Amino acid sequence: MRPIRPVSRMGRTLMACAASAAVATVGLAVSPAAAAPAATAAAAAHAKAAATAQAESGGACTAADLGTRHPYIKSSEVTPTITHFKGWYVTSGSTGSQTVTTSVQTTITVSVGLTGKVEGNFAVETLGKVGASLGLDVKMSYTSTSTESTAVTWNFRDPGYYGLYKGTKKVTGTYGSLNCNRVQQGDGSWALKWIEGSDTGSYTTYTALEEGAVRCEDKVPANSIMRKAQALLDCGSGTAAAEHPAGPVASAKAPATPAPATPAPAKRTAAKRAAALNCQPAVYKIEVPGKPLNWSAPLLANDGIRLRESTFMSAHLDNWRLCDVTERNGVIEAALWNWGNGGCATVPANIANQEQAYLTTATCAQDDLQRFSIYRDVPGSSKIGIQNKYTGFMMGHDRYADGELIRQYSSGRQDGTGTYTLTAV
């Protein structure tokens, strides 16, 4: 391995000549003219049917899906949770309808993945699959139980010691990502299939809040929201047995203020290595299939990677090399080093959790924001999809136009504009 340094005009010429003669070591097409064989009518019909079918692991996909992804649910746990509570004593002279202001006990916030919010199609689709798999109507937008009203109105028919509550079913678990990639079949042929991608994460959501009142002597189902509330009543203690004036009763089991939330573990591993990049010799353009525009790195630090047409003035800003390449289950992971400015493609850290954050280049630091999974079409085609390792988002563009920024999309571009070609120079 050796450091990457700026090269002279003569050095760049020699490198370009060497690169054009090199054969890529990752099994990608090395000729701009390389293309997949023409599909038969039967294959085309099959591809169309696959495109309209729901993504399932091992199911067929098409080249237009290379820049997309869909979630699948790996695990789910449903936990009855008390979000608001107040102990309340009712005397014989204070029965009837009363409105009681409860205290917030537990705050549940809807979140998917590292963003801490529900932004973009992928997060919404994830929560939709959670609800469907469990048969529950769960929250599918960014919200929190702390925004719910704390007031509970209840008609007390009998005197006694009550727990007034609001509660919900908290739903947590993990998800994975289904991505389209080439798979070699038993007969040696290749096909595009939905496979388990590199991204995974956790989610939290909840069902609609329920409210009510419960006493120690009430018979309630085990592991129910009512049973959770009953457990906060100090049943069997002097608090429950003693006579009290009508009104609130403090409960040692129900603190008036919620415990501080435990921050979600950071997914990003930003450790930097002093070692230089180990780049493969081949040089590529990342092109829009069948069109002249391709990824071009910025000259200015505050600009992003844009679609540009290659000219003699491009100064190698449209030339990319794959560095520190690894491969797992047929999926390549690499840093994308730009020959023109010497930087590595990255999503800016301050906006990495945002839908449609733009892609740029920065000093090669080798954290996960600068690592990308590359999903490939079948051999003979150079079409690819690109996914950021840290965010899990897919790369794409809003519209085909000179100067259009390359951005990240949580589910990718479902219209196929997230599929590019990796063409050897």
Image (cartoon, rainbow, N blue to C red):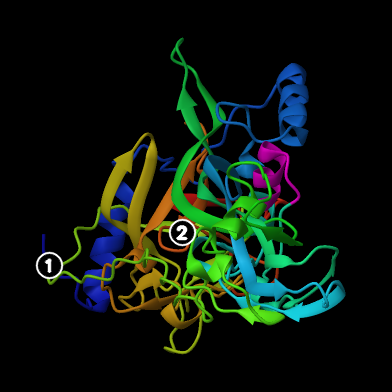
- Disc 2 designates what residue? 285
- Percent from the top left, x then y, of residue 372? 40, 57
**Badge 1: residue crowd in 10 Å (few <14, some 14–19, many ≥20):** few
Alpha carbons under labels 2 and 1: distance apart: 26 Å
SS assignment at label 2: strand
Q: Outermost residue, top direction?
A: 187
To which residue does mark 1 refer? 275
Residue 292 position, x and y percent, is: 62, 61
Give percent across and percent down for residue 231.
54, 57
Q: Nearer the viewer, residue 394 or 255?
A: 255
> Considering only order in the chain, which callout, 1 or 2, is on the residue closer to the N terminus?
1
The residue range painted magenta reads 127-137
Horizontal side of 378 relative to 397 (left or right) equals left
Helix, strand or loop at mark 1:
loop
At 30% from the left edge and 76% from the top edge, which residue is drawn?
A: 342
Left or right: 236 in relation to 343: right
Nearer to the camera, 159 or 137: 159
